[in-house]
Structures are given as structure tokens and as C-alpha cells.
Image: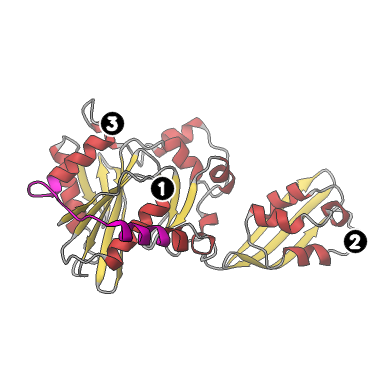
Amino acid sequence: MYFVDNRNVTDPRLNLALEEYLLRQATVQEPLLLFYINEPAVIIGRHQNGLEEIDPDYVEENGIHLVRRLSGGGAVYHDLGNLNFSFVTPDREKLHDFSAFVQPVVAVLQALGVPAALAGKSDIVVDGKKVSGNAQFSSGGRMFSHGTLLFDTNLAHMLAALNPRQTAIESRAVQSIRQFVTNIREWLPEGIDIGTLRQHLLNGLFDGPPREYKLDAAAWAAVRRLREERYANWAWNVGRAPAYNVQKKAQYPFGVVDVRLQVNRGHIEEVTVFGSFAAEADLAPLVAALTGVRHEPAALREALSALSVGDFIPGMDSAALVELLY
């Protein structure tokens, strides 16, 4: 097995691009091990609709990336307190066998005094609380198995970001989530930071000093291109979402506004507006302006910029309508 140094990159789009590059382009016929730490991000599964997994307002206001990965499974929150590991193998023999990749990580944690165990098919738990989830992806006869390790993740931020109903979060909700997840740091001796944990994992997963698989300048250029073409691309992260419907209704001083959207590949295909407001103008120009537009705030604002929303829905402005539509 070889170790791949990601040069301390914390951009989730570049780290996922690096992982895919190793899967598709690595030339060695031995397994590779990659570690990476991401700045705050929600990483969604290949087949998920991101808007159904997050609080979009919280994510936007806090500069949290939304990035789609190749593997399936659910949405996860990453921050600088989360250590990610990825095993890239030149064959698919261990596809669906998560224990082959997770159990060695568990063994290292146990050696550090953490009472870790494999739970279910692919989770690592400590004292019954989850600290790691794992997923896999295969292509061209190769595969990777990757997972998270909650070292010192901000659980309050995680709960707020992964809050699709946009419900009010009280302090007891953060305490409640601690019944189900925990940070490994709580079980480690003082002085062990996330970098030290990474080094312990390196030492434990390799029989002797790790051999390094180094990427040259051309390889890193290819990784950066992949970042731009896929992981920094709206069409992949949002537009690839399955078709979905949006129905939102709100009460305003001037009446109720009820909007229905049909969205496909991230673009609005159909718009219907109902309500008890006193509309005097035909809504057709408003509907036409929104049809075909990306279902995201910036695109909605741009689409409405040439219209006076109040002419169609008296008392409402474009900012309020964008908030309702999204």
C-alpha cells in the first residue's frame, strides 16, 4: 500500500477531485491511502437532492460548501475537526466488504484507548455513539472505500447545516444529538490533536514507514481541472439532483401566497402561484420570467430584476418572493 499526501489541502472540491483522480488515473497496482481534512462543507451522496438535506440559508450565510461526491449514501458535514480517510484499490474484490477497510482503523483507535467498534455494515461507534460513516464507489474495475472520523467537529454547526426543515434549533437539540454521535477527542488523552491522530493511523495502517505515491505537476494540474469540471460545477453539485417539487405557503399582511414549483436538473420547469392576495395583473409574465431559471437565490433574483413583483402580487417585493421560492 502507498500513502498519498494531499499537501494539507482543505478545499473539499479539490480533495474529492484528488480522490477521483487516484481512482481513475493512478498507475500503481497496489492500494492507496489518502487522508484529507475539509473546511466546512456538506458532502451529499451521488443520488441526493442537496436542498432536501440542508438548511440553504444557514449554509449560504456561513460560507459552507455544498459538494456532491461520487459514492452513494447520505449527507455528511465536514469541518476542520473531521478527518477523512480513503482507501483506493486496483480491484473490486472487497466491494461491499466495509470491514476490510474499517476494521484496521478501529484497531488503531483501540490501541489509543478509544473503545471503538464496527457497528452495522459500515459505521464506527464509540460507546454506542457514531464517530464514522463509510461509503464506496467502483469504476473501471477499481474502487474506493472512504469514511469520516469525527475528531472535534462542531456538532452545533453540523446540526444547523443538516436541517432541511429549517426548524428553530434550541440548545437541548445539540445535547440530544450527542446521544447519537460523539467526537473521538473526548476519548483521547490530552495533547493528541487531529494531526497526531492522522500520524497514529499512518503508523498503524502501514507495516513500517509508509511508501508515498507522489503526484507530479501534470497530475496535480489534472486534479485541478477535474475540480473545475466536476466538483466546483453547479451542474454536478446541484443540477444533477433528481427531479423534485416545491410547495411553500406563507401568510403576509396583504394575504396568503402559495407557490408550487416543478424542478428538474436544478431548473424550474413549471411555476404555479396561488393565494388570497388582491392580484389585478395577469401573473403570466411573472411565471414566464421564472420558468427555466436555476432554482437558486442568485438566479431567481436575476430573473426577477426586470420586473416589479408588486405589480403582480401587491405588497410583495422580489426579496420576499425569492425567499418564498427557495
> Identity of the amino acid at label 2?
Ala
Q: Earlier in the sequence, mark 1 or mark 2?
A: 1
Q: Earlier in the sequence, mark 1 or mark 3?
A: 1
Badge 2 marks a residue whose secondary structure is: loop
Marks 1 and 3 sit apart, C-alpha to C-alpha, by: 26 Å
Is residue 136 among the parts visible in the rendering? no
Is residue 82 among the parts visible in the rendering? yes
Badge 1 marks a residue whose secondary structure is: loop
274 part of magenta stretch: no
| Span highlighted in magenta in the image | 204-226
Query: Residue at the location (32% across, 43% down)?
Result: 8
Residue 40 placed where, x, y %? 44, 43
Residue under label 1: 11
- Label 1 Cα crowd, 10 Å radius (few <14 / some 14-19 / many 20+): some
Query: Residue at the location (76% across, 56% down)?
Result: 304
278 to the left or right of 134: right
Marks 1 and 2 sit apart, C-alpha to C-alpha, by: 48 Å
Badge 3 marks a residue whose secondary structure is: helix
For residue 192, above or below residue 77: above
> Identity of the amino acid at label 1?
Asp
Residue 211 placed where, x, y %? 14, 52
Q: Hey, which residue is sitting farthest top in the picture?
A: 190
Residue under label 3: 186
Residue 153 placed where, x, y %? 37, 37
77 to the left or right of 186: right
